[in-house]
């Protein structure tokens, strides 16, 4: 056992799972330790963890639901054992909403927690779990700083004109405006871009975060200037199970003419739409690509069509385009989806190199492409750990 090793723990507490990752600090470098998750909290909780590629833990914790509190307690004990005496410098938490006031990662105390509670109504599915984890860790690890890292913070550079909905001003004053999400992922991409393409890093880039949740972000000189997600993480692209943007009139029709209740519409928009809803087969792009059912092709067509439309819109917001970057599950792994989006965007100056695209890059554009194209595996955990180190000085 060593007494001088220092560790950072990263937590992402969601509605049915708590994901975790540890880093050992070595000077200014961060070396990844264990990563994994407690999943299936509401059904059949399971703990799985890997060190590198090796599976070191994979067990069902109990038959039947486990509370978030009990799951976190169990996780703290597991992590303390895995850290083997290393001192925890700080815990970084992914927190979905920091509103307009939290523009950067913040050390959380009781007063900050109270301020963060105000954003629960803006992200009722995620924020309560994020905050409950911070509250419990403050109790269990007294003296260890808890650092909140926000999915919204990276987008606080978006100009007012891109944040406002065309509603009477009192609604914006009440918080109804575009915030944007996936900020930690975009911030990571922005941190990698200078080493790949200095011109694009200083210029105009559109990043595609295409996973279960999907969004796109326009960055100018590494700062967010527009993004497809807005007031909530349901705006923008169609996703695994989320609808993406709808004509607001559709909602009125669902309520008035089809007699749906608020919670039914919520379930429809978040859990029953997107790729799953359109295909009737799966929310998983792999399964849709492997299927020859017409509904699966249609779902992929709508997804790539919307991505192309949004690329044109974000390029317009930027006034031009120097690079596109693909990240997250679909963006990193699905050459066919990237190829389709880029083929449709040839008019913007994007030309892929098909072999490089099949190999997943990192550079996937041809030598003569005016707009460079890249695959960058995202790493929100490293981004959070870097923030913890920086915030704690
Ligand atoms: P989340 O948004 O929950 O973090 P991911 O980023 O893993 O999820 O994205 C999930 C999507 O990415 C699914 O549609 C899946 O088909 C796709 N995906 C994830 N991993 C791979 C892979 N190795 N190969 C192909 N597709 C993948």
Image (spheres, rainbow, N blue to C red):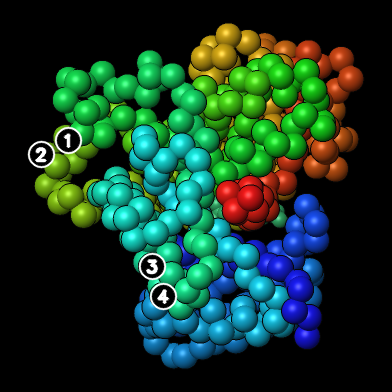
Residue displayed at 85% across by 43% down: 359
Give the mark nearest the N terminus, 1 or 4: 4
Q: Which residue does the numbered mark 4 point to in the structure image?
A: 139
Q: Is mark 2 within 8 Å of ligand 1?
A: no
Badge 2 element: helix
Expressed as whole percent of the image width and height from the top left, the position of residue 341 reads: 64, 29
Left or right of 160 on screen, residue 380 = right
Closest to the observer, 108 or 385: 108
The Cα atoms of the two marked residues, 4 and 2, are separated by 47 Å
Expressed as whole percent of the image width and height from the top left, the position of residue 282 reads: 51, 56
Residue displayed at 61% across by 38% down: 187
The Cα atoms of the two marked residues, 3 and 2, are separated by 41 Å
Give the mark nearest the N terminus, 1 or 3: 3
Badge 3 element: helix
Asked which quadrant contains residue 173, the reply is top left
Q: Which residue does the numbered mark 2 point to in the structure image?
A: 256
The Cα atoms of the two marked residues, 1 and 3, are separated by 41 Å
Tag of residue 253: 1
Q: Assess whether mark 2 and mark 4 are in contact (beta carbons under 8 angstroms).
A: no
Q: Residues within 10 Å of mark 4 (few under 14, many from 20)?
A: few
Q: Assess whether mark 2 and mark 1 are in contact (beta carbons under 8 angstroms).
A: yes
Question: Quick check: 214 above or below 25?
Answer: above
- Comparing labels 1 and 3, the label whose residue is closer to the camera: 3
Q: Assess whether mark 4 and mark 3 are in contact (beta carbons under 8 angstroms).
A: yes
Badge 1 element: helix
Q: Which residue does the numbered mark 3 point to in the structure image?
A: 135
- Comparing labels 1 and 4, the label whose residue is closer to the camera: 4
Left or right of 85 on screen, residue 357 = right
Residue displayed at 88% across by 35% down: 355
From where the camera sits, is residue 386 visible?
yes
Q: Assess whether mark 3 and mark 1 are in contact (beta carbons under 8 angstroms).
A: no
């Amino acid at each position: 056992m060593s007494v001088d090793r220092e560790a950072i723990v990263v937590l992402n507490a969601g509605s049915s799972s708590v994901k975790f990752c540890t880093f050992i600090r070595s000077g200014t470098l961060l070396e990844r330790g264990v990563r994994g998750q407690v999943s299936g909290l509401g059904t059949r909780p399971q703990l799985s963890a890997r060190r590198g590629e090796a599976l070191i833990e994979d067990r069902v914790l109990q038959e039947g639901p486990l509370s978030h509190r009990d799951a976190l307690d169990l996780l703290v004990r597991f992590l303390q054992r895995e850290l083997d005496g290393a001192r925890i410098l700080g815990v970084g938490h992914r927190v979905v909403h920091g509103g307009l006031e939290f523009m950067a990662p913040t050390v959380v105390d009781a007063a900050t927690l109270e301020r963060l509670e105000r954003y629960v109504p803006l992200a009722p599915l995620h924020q309560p779990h994020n905050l409950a984890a911070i509250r419990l860790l403050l109790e269990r690890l007294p003296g260890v700083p808890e650092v909140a890292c926000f999915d919204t913070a990276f987008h606080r550079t978006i100009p007012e004109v891109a944040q406002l909905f065309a509603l009477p001003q009192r609604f914006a004053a009440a918080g109804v405006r575009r915030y944007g999400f996936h900020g930690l992922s975009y911030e990571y991409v922005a941190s990698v871009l200078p080493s790949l393409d200095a011109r694009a890093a200083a210029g105009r880039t559109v990043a595609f975060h295409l996973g279960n949740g999907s969004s796109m972000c326009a960055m100018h000189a590494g700062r967010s200037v527009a993004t497809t997600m807005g007031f909530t993480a349901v705006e923008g692209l169609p996703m695994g199970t989320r609808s993406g943007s709808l004509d607001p009139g559709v909602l009125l029709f669902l309520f008035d003419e089809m007699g749906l209740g608020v919670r039914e519409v919520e379930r429809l928009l978040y859990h029953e739409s997107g790729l799953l809803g359109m295909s009737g087969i799966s929310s998983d792009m792999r399964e849709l690509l492997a299927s020859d059912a017409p509904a699966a092709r249609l779902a992929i067509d709508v997804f790539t069509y919307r991505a192309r439309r949004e690329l044109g819109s974000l390029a317009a917001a930027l006034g031009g385009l120097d690079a596109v970057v693909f990240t997250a599950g679909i963006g990193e792994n699905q050459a066919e989806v990237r190829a389709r989006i880029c083929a449709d965007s040839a008019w913007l100056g994007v030309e892929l190199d098909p072999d490089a695209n099949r190999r997943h890059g990192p550079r996937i554009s041809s030598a003569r492409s005016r707009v460079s194209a890249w695959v960058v595996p995202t790493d929100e955990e490293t981004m959070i750990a870097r923030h913890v180190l920086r915030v704690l000085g």
